Image: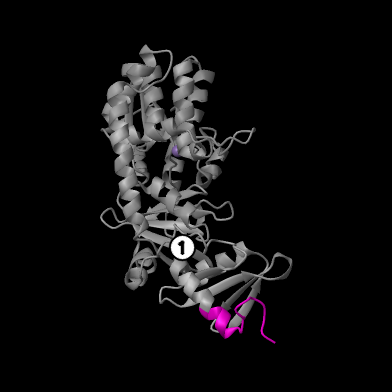
Amino acid sequence: MYYILTHNDLDGVGCGILAKYAFGEKAEVRYNSIGSLNYQVERFLEEHDKKTYLFITDLSVNEENEKRLNEFVQMGGKVTLLDHHKTALHLNEKEWASVKVAYEDGRLASATSLFYEFLQQNGFLEEKASLNEFTELVRQYDTWEWDKHNNKTAKQLNDLLFLMSIEEFAENMTQRLQEHDRFFFNEFEEKLLAVENEKIERYIRKKKRELVQTFSGDNCVGIVHAESYHSELGNELGKQHPHIDYIAIVNMGGKRMSFRTIHDETDVSQIANQFGGGGHVKASGCPLTEEAYELFVAKPFRMEPLRADSEQNLYNVKGAQNGTLYENSKGDYFYTFPVDEGKWMIEHDEKQTEFPSFSEAERFLKRYHACRLVEDERFVAFLQQYAKTKGLGEKGGYNE
Ligand SMILES: [Mn+2]
């Protein structure tokens, strides 16, 4: 018998599918949240002996279970733990664990890709085009590489998982991989995915109007409440507001939080760690502790959501030679304009501050004043007023 304890996300489910493909009826697969794994490992050790081979994929065990698994292995039990989370790297000391975050060529690893290689190397299954394609879709989705390569199929595979139960999805996919040489979605799935795609877009449009911005330590954080589509939402909001270091997504009902970042210099696994969670550099999660509640829910409760930049402008555009006009939530203006050598000045309240570039000036305005780009009409009115107060003549140039 083979017993597989794996994560309940696409990467974890991918491992379950490969196990069913390789071992068929001899495999028992359990899908777990991060929180429930350690309990399941304990139960396994109570109920099974060394005749059952235990796989733990896409998840890692706590210290007590580390010890218990050591004993189990010493007594002749078979265990293989495969993971790709940075937070599990210390487990590499164990002969029964292999944790790899990235391949030598720089591609990021996923549990499904590691398990696929393991199963081949140990003669449990043979390479096949459909398996290669499926594994690569899961890997790209889990590592977010799909976004860079614009691989929509990877994203759709994950959408499909959440449109049905894990068991139904796993059964369909295992069968498809067995019966076909290439991987594909059937007609019904294609239709489901098209409807789902529209639904996600509507949801994200709505959530964009609810984003609140604040600081946590030195980090500028965007906070939004959402129960679903955390990855899509984190990515969209991150791209729309590149001045924000990371996006925190609060799920009040589930008492959990997710963190997402699009920036290489921010590590959200560390942020999650502070609140007893973990995960990847660019995507992580934690329980909504009292401390996290204070910081991400109670404190920002009275804040106004960020307003988006005016989009249809012809004159008040970013980095324009006539300057660019921003406002904060109170409607106070911040005017930024080019000065010598590519430098930009911000003028506010008759005070001027110089920045090395337009993007630095904008970043400052957005981070520390939560500014937005104002509409053309008000920009034109502002410039007329500005010209008058600065003594600019009708024909242009200064009146001496
Ligand atoms: Mn994973």
| Mark 1 residue CB less than 8 A from any atom of ligand 1 | no
Q: Please state, as top left, top right, bottom left or bottom right, where the N terminus lies in the image.
A: top left
Above/below status of 230 relative to 343: above
Task: Name which residue lies at 34% across and 61% down.
Answer: 210
Main SS, magenta region, reads loop
| Image location of residue 334, percent across then percent down | 52, 75
- What residue type is disc 1 on? Val
| Image location of residue 108, percent across then percent down | 55, 37
Query: Residue pushed farthest bottom?
Result: 400
Task: Name which residue lies at 55% across and 56% down.
Answer: 266
The residue pinned by badge 1 equals 221
Return the residue nearer the eye: 250 or 357.
Answer: 357
Taking the image in four quarters, ligand 1 sits in the one at top left
Above/below status of 167 relative to 70: above
Return the residue nearer the eye: 146 or 10.
Answer: 146
Q: Please state, as top left, top right, bottom left or bottom right, where the C terminus lies in the image.
A: bottom right
| Image location of residue 192, percent across then percent down | 28, 31
Part of the protein shown in magenta = 385-400
Report whether residue 33 is seen: yes
49 is within the stretch colored magenta: no
Instruction: Please tell me how crowded label 1 is: few (under 14), some (14-19), or many (20+) other residues with Cα within 10 Å.
Output: many
Snapshot quadrant of residue 294: bottom left
